[in-house]
Structure formats: C-alpha cells, structure tokens
Image (cartoon, grey):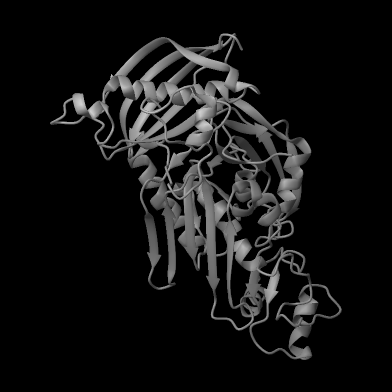
Amino acid sequence: MMENQQLPYQQTLKGPVTISGVGLHTGAHVNMTLKPATPGFGIKFQRIDLPGQPIVKADVDYVVDTSRGTTLEHNGARVSTVEHLLAALVGMGIDNILIELDGPEIPIMDGSSQPFIEEIEKVGAEAQDAQKIYYSIDTNISYYDEVKKVEMTAMPSVDYRITCLIDFNSQVLGTQHANLKSMADFKQEIAPCRTFCFLHELEYLLANNLIKGGDLNNAIVVVDKPMTEEQLKPLAKAFNREQISVQREGILNNIELRFPNEPARHKLLDIVGDLALIGYPIKAHIMANRPGHASNVEFARKIKAYIKKNKHMKDVPIYDPNQPPVFDVRRIEKFLPHRHPFLLIDKIIELSHNKVIGIKNVTFNEPQFQGHFPNNPVMPGVLQIEALAQVGGILALSPLPDAELYDTYFLKIDNCKFKQKVLPGDTMILKMELLSPIRRGIVEMRGTVFIGNKVATEADLVAQIIKREGK
C-alpha cells in the first residue's frame, strides 16, 4: 500500500497509466495518460492534441480562471479542473509526473479524487534517487477576503495537516468542518468525497449550457429551496432520469452521501489540490474558513512568495513543544551511556532511518557556565558538537534490536563551522542526517544546530558502532 508519511525520497510512477472520461464543463471526452518523470521534473500537463504539444506546469503562476474549478494556461495551452487530480497526486506522494491530455479538461470521473488514486495504485509508486525537500513554514501566513469572508492561515507544524470549515448560511448544509491530521489518511478520509453544488447554481449552469459533461453521478446537489414535482421534471429530463426527488437531508436522491460531512471534506480535497500549485512540498497546519478555488489560489501565491523569499530555510526543523517526543530522557538513557552532567539531549522529536532531530534546552545552571566565560556565558563549541554526536548515536543505534550492547565513537569531524553563539535560554534543535548507508559499523552524518530558524553550528561527523566489552 502506498502512503504519504513525510516521504524521504521523491516518487514517480512505476509505469504509465491511462484514464478516460468526460470533462464536467466542456463535455469533451478526454484521454489522459500519466507517465513517469525524472527527479525534479515536478507535475506537468501536456496537450498532445495541440500543435507543438505544449506543456503547462502545475504552478500557481499559470492559473487563469477559478470560477468553476482551477484552470491553468501557458504556452498557448489551457487545462481545466486540475484540482482533483492534483489532490490525488499529493495524497499518494507522487512528485514527478507528465500528464498527457488530448483535450482541454481533466475528466471529472465521479467528482472526487478516488478514481485517480485507484488507477495510480494499479501501477504503483516508485521511490527515486533524490531527496524530497519539505519547506517548513516558521511563521503564520494569513489570507483574508473581506467580501467573501474567507480566512486562511498556514501555521508552523511538524507535518502537513489541514482543518477546513464551511458555512453557506444554508439551512440544509449548515456549518460543517473537516480535518486531515496526516496525508497518510487522505486516501481513506478525503479522496472519496465528491464535489457539490446548490440547486440554484445547477439551474443556472444548465440554463447557460455550462456543465455539458455533468450528470447526477459526479456531484452532490444541495436543494436550498422548496421544490415541487413539476419543478423537478426539467432536472430529471436534463439528466436522463425518469424521476428525481429530494431526500430528507435536503440532497437530491441521485447518490448516497459517503460521509455526513462530505461537502466539507471535498472542500478540504480542493485545498490539497490547489495548494499543490505552490510547487513545493510543505510542512504547515492549514486552517481554512469558507475556502473556495479563488481564495485557495491567492493563498497558494502568498505561500509560494514566502518560500521563494525564505528558501534558505527549507531544511529548518519545526519544533512544537506540545507534541509528545519520540524518545524522552529515560528512553535516551537506554540507548546512550552518558549521564548528568554530560547527557546533552533532553528529547528526540523525530527519528527515521536516515534522520534524527533532538532538543537540548540550554540553561544557565549547567556546570560549563561556571568556568566558560562566566561573565559572558556561551555554550562551548565542543559541547555543541558533543550534543550532535549524542543525537547521532541515537540515529546509529536505533535500527539495532540490542542497541544497549553497543556504543558509538568519534572517528572524524570535518567542515565544522560555528556561525552563531548559543546562550543560556536558547533551545538547540539538533539535526543529524546520514550521508550514506551505514556499512560495517561506519556512520557518516551531517549535523546542524539550529537556534530558531538560524543555523548556529554545522559539521560532518564520522562515528563507528562498537560492541561494549564483555557484552
């Protein structure tokens, strides 16, 4: 099963997959082929039915319309209703892909992302030989539309999560909210949720021939006014049905809701798809109140501008003290032989096969400050490196089933730089990353000490895993 849980490497598809269907707004039958692409390629659309087969990058800079979905245009090529497919790609962790189209619009399918995910899973995802870089938001980024009363905020977070609230002042729909705590839940919790519209919108669209590909299998219709059987007859005729009625919940009887709050979940799905146009994987908690495609796109532009301005901060870990640690100090002591006053890690907040992040709270009461510049206390550089080494020891030993039988010893320190003083009151965020797989007990790591979003210290360290004597 493919899941997106802060994937360390970029991904593409194992092979091509073709999906065919009708465009909701154009009514055009479209054949679409998703093809694997090289690392760093990103997500791009190609209109193979146009002269020169122009390519449109999935980028917020190329959005030209958000009235009934999100439309991109570049190089003389236009691609409409991209959001549901983009959401599926983000949800499944696909970074690099070429999407060939022989028409102007992505097929609507059932109005959700689920059919795309099902096709993607048939061929499967493939990890690539390139690291996936997540961009951390280290300050609140907000967007507000006073006319539409839309509020959107991106807040610092250790992962990518979304909370969505909708309120249409409708007695039928009411206020709904949806929450995505992890992109690993997208496939089950969000992908099946279909697009929706109100009956008055549907009547307008039908009257103006604006949903040529619409039928009652790809949208939830919210009936926001009393309807007689006579008034429902034109709808039945438009959708080739003998009869249409309104269910108790105020929804047309074409389909059963997949979740009680399916409309709110679909709005969240749209956010995932539209924010894919930022062009960078992000770590942030998105809070959205009354979102729509226009606000999603403006918000994506704001986040993209922030990332471009602060690109040097892409590797800065986010430390949320409210999150429980992966290792507390008691568990750290089971891995490392160090004890007070030489145990220099308070907790581990992230641990994977190739990366570890630890926390060290620097206080004035520590013994080194009694003799190391007592009138101007500065954390000694050698102790910063030692703290990194201890965090690296956790990274090196954590894969071992009997880690308590081993220690790690320094072999080499290279490229060591001290860029900023570390003072009492600072919180050191200690990151160690493997430079190569561990072989024969040799561990090559790159270490960085962050204070806030600034790099204080960095160094390359080599250590060796050695079994304790007599063990």
Residue 67 position, x and y percent, is 53, 64
Residue 261 position, x and y percent, is 65, 68
Tell me the residue at 60%/52% (across/down).
82
Front residue of 339 and 419? 339
Q: Is residue 187 left or right of residue 72?
A: right
Q: Is residue 336 left or right of residue 303?
A: right
Which image quarter: residue 50?
Answer: top right
Residue 142 vs 149, above or below: the answer is above
Tell me the residue at 64%/33% (across/down).
12
Residue 47 position, x and y percent, is 62, 43
Judge whether residue 437 can be spotted in this image: no
Front residue of 99 and 412? 412
Residue 27 position, x and y percent, is 70, 60
Judge whether residue 227 can be spotted in this image: yes
**Residue furthest to the right:** 242
Front residue of 68 and 295? 295
Front residue of 51 and 126? 126
